[in-house]
Image: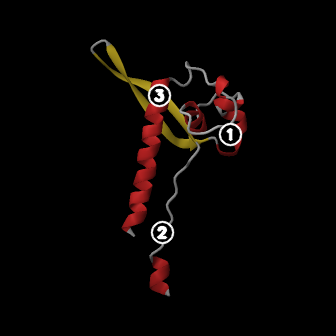
Amino acid sequence: MRNICQAFRIESQGTNASVSSFRKGKWGSHSTLQVNVGPQSVGYRLIQDALIFGGEIVTASDVAVAEGLAEMGNAGLISPNKLSREMSRDAVQQIHTMLEDVIDRAKVI
């Protein structure tokens, strides 16, 4: 029994992380957008802090609503100044990559 129990490992991935962006650099006349997902989380404050609930913090839930992946809150509260189309697409891609990494680590066991 001891060997079986040692084979289990817990992996954790936050699913309601905050999403932030900043201009990374300039290439010619274009600046590149850098999107960061997490590690900060609004957690239980989602209904106070997320854009879709009238808050000021861009969350993964806001991204999911903006991309049509979820229906909750009020999508009309998502301002393009706070969450652009480019930023939401990049955030979805980064979230997919993060989840794929966790799944891959779980497969190694």
User: Mark 2: which secondary structure?
Assistant: loop
Residue sitting at the far bottom: 1
**49, 79: nearer the viewer:** 79
Q: Earlier in the sequence, mark 2 or mark 1?
A: 2
* Numbered disc in front, either 2 or 3: 3
Residue plotted at (56% across, 23% down): 82
Q: Which residue is mark 2?
A: 9
- Looking at the rendered structure, which numbered label has been put on residue 46? 1
* Residue type highlighted by circle 3: Met
Q: Which residue is mark 3?
A: 87
* Residue type highlighted by circle 1: Leu
Q: Is residue 106 above or below residue 3?
A: above
User: Mark 3: which secondary structure?
Assistant: helix
The span from disc 2 to disc 1 (Cα, nearest Å) is 29 Å
Q: Position of residue 86 (x, y in %)?
A: 45, 26
Can the viewer see residue 7 in this picture? yes
**8, 79: nearer the viewer:** 79
- Looking at the rendered structure, which numbered label has been put on residue 55? none
* Residue type highlighted by circle 2: Arg
| Number of on-image labels | 3
User: Mark 1: which secondary structure?
Assistant: helix
Q: Position of residue 64 (x, y in %)?
A: 56, 37
